[in-house]
Image (cartoon, helix red, strand yellow):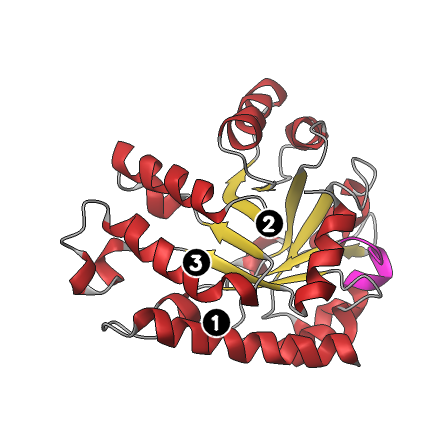
Amino acid sequence: MERPQLIAEIFRKKTFLCVGLDTEISKIPPLLHSESDPVFAFNKAIIDATRDLCVAYKPNLAFYEALGPAGWQSLQKTIQYIGNEHFIIADAKRGDIGNTSRMYAEAFFNQMGCDAVTVAPYMGEDSVSPFLGFPGKWAIVLALTSNAGSSDFQRDWLEDSREAMWEKVLRRTQDWGTPDNLMFVVGATHPEAFARVRDIAPDHFLLVPGVGAQGGDVASICQYGLTKDCGLLINASRSILYASNGADFAEKAREEARKLQAEMERALGD
């Protein structure tokens, strides 16, 4: 999906919600366990319940890989069911040497039909650039993540550049791509950092995990993160997926997604 189409969908639907499909088979409603593919049955119901309230879906590959070949089949069916009208992010956190990254890029973009892949930049430009050579496709580089362990390295102060490591990642990787094919992950659990993020990367889209179960909130992100093109994809996973474990799970998921969409509509209207 090209950047203009993504922006147009955001303003048409009045939402910048990304629904994370971190589907854990032990947490889906028991009533689905008799299905031939319980994971896909669950995903299908969630997608049907939220399709008009979001612009993106983000399957976390670990939850599918853990199920072996059957999990990959569930993932492929899920991606096909989402279709072309939503931005599809493979949350794979890849980042290997160049030829390996090229194979990952071909797998996610050409074979699976995803629009974007999350990428770890630790191994440098040659591990990221293969993802940037596909028209209409995106690399989403991990910059300042939402987990507690982000303090171990990402916020370390670098004396040579007089900035935190995550700031150097933002600054350096912008030379590798453009706002048309490069996004950054910035966690909602760091609302104080968004002003600095926009100083360094004013035009790039940000994928923002950590809303909902991890405690981040939409208003604090939008205060400094929102741009004229929106520039945000705010992800929620567990708070939507597991709003209920009963027969009303899809209905409750929709209610949670609707709350977030309403906040986003207000933010876009400001």
Q: Earlier in the sequence, mark 2 or mark 1?
A: 2
Location of mark 1 (residue): 214
- Give the camera-side residue of 67 and 240: 240
Instruction: Give left or right: position of 82 versus 126.
Output: left
Amino acid beneath label 1: Gln
Q: Which residue is mark 3?
A: 47
The amino acid on which the numbered mark 2 sits, given as a three-letter code, is Glu
Q: Disc 3 or 1, which lies upstream in sequence?
A: 3
Is 174 rendered above or below residue 53?
above
The stretch in magenta equals: 197-204
| Image quarter (top left, top right, bottom left or bottom right) of the N terminus | top right
- Seen in the image, is 60 located left or right of residue 225? left
Q: Is residue 104 above or below residue 94?
A: above
Say which quarter of the image contains residue 203: bottom right
Say what secondary structure mark 2 lies in. Answer: loop
The image quadrant of residue 244 is bottom left
245 lies left or right of 84: left
